[in-house]
Amino acid sequence: MSSDELNSAVCGGLAPLFEWRGLKHPKHLDFQQFLESLCVSPLVPQEVLEVARKAHGLPYPPHWSEEVDAASGALYFFHDLREESSWQHPLTDTFREVLQQVCSCSEEKLRLDRLAARIEEVLTEIQARAAADLQQWIGPLGEASEQYFYNSVTGCSTWEDPCERWRYDIHVRYDLLVGFLVSQERSAAREAVPDMTHTLTSLASSMSSVQSILANSLTNPSAHCADPDDPEASGARWARPRHRRSCLPLPPKATGAAPRRALFSMPPHQQQYASQVRESTGRPPPPPPPPPGPPSR
């Protein structure tokens, strides 16, 4: 099977990530700082570095954008639905898991058929993890113009569609891991390539069914209420998220294990240029996360 046939067979179930509408792309994200934030050495095997480089250029998840603190030149990330800011890349955990899996496969020097089977196992596991998490969510609730979702375990509501969040996360994992598989197939082009038809067909089938599986994992509001005549069945029993404000609120304070300092920054000449662009467009940037300090009581 040629590399083009391999790529087509495995990617047949999902459109390219760059075809997602409304996604923001990295503009000032430095690759070396990106590696450091993921605890990845620049001396890792070349195939691992190639996956990291591809991850570095991927669009941010839905509703996330890259912003710059004009005062310090530090980069941070802003979620417009949750109205939250973070120093950490929104896909940090996803990228770390994928790169650890790629490193492991690279060290083991798996045959192509075993590598494809390993990737299938990894993607099946993350799909099951997503489905289990989505079972905690009830929705969509509210009017069609203002739909929201309620978590029955935490008691929290959000405007963000958890199904969309998981779908993008899984899509990123597919894109990076399958890209790694294709690159390994190309490097082994001169060797005898085993027949991977069954594994690739299974991967393609799994990819094409991701959206329906995730959507079906959400709990339907009517199914969660035993009495369909209960007025609470309409969603009144589940608190709506706070109303979204037209102006950006102050970001929440850093808590727990989240980074308490900037992880990314721009060189001075880029800072000056970005500041000039913002002034020319008249678009005020979202506020950056707070500076390091003791946790709030």
Image (cartoon, grey):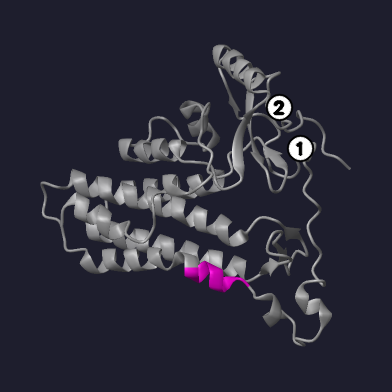
**Left or right, residue 265 beside residue 239:** left
Q: Which residue is mark 2?
A: 284
Quadrant in which the C terminus appears: top right
Residue 117 in percent (x, y) is at 31, 63
The reply to whether discs 2 and 1 touch (Cβ–Cβ < 8 Å) is: yes
**Left or right, residue 183 beside residue 98:** left
Residue 62 in percent (x, y) is at 57, 48
| Residue 111 appears in the picture as rendered | no
Which kind of residue does numbered mark 2 sit on? Pro
Tell me which numbered mark, 2 or 1, is placed earlier along the sequence. Answer: 1
Residue 193 in percent (x, y) is at 15, 56
Secondary element at image label 1: loop
Residue 171 in percent (x, y) is at 45, 54
Vertical arrangement, residue 58 with respect to residue 170, above or below: above
Q: Which mark is residue 248?
A: 1
Q: Quadrant of residue 275?
A: top right
Vertical arrangement, residue 128 with respect to residue 283, above or below: below
Vertical arrangement, residue 161 with respect to residue 266, above or below: below
Q: Residue at x 71, y 48 (%)?
A: 82
Q: Which mark is residue 45?
A: none
Label 2 CA crowd tier, 10 Å (few <14, some 14–19, many 20+): few
Work out whether residue 180 or residue 288 is closer to the camera in this orientation and state it: 288
Residue placed furthest toward the right: 297
Magenta stretch holds residue 141: no
Which kind of residue does numbered mark 1 sit on? Leu
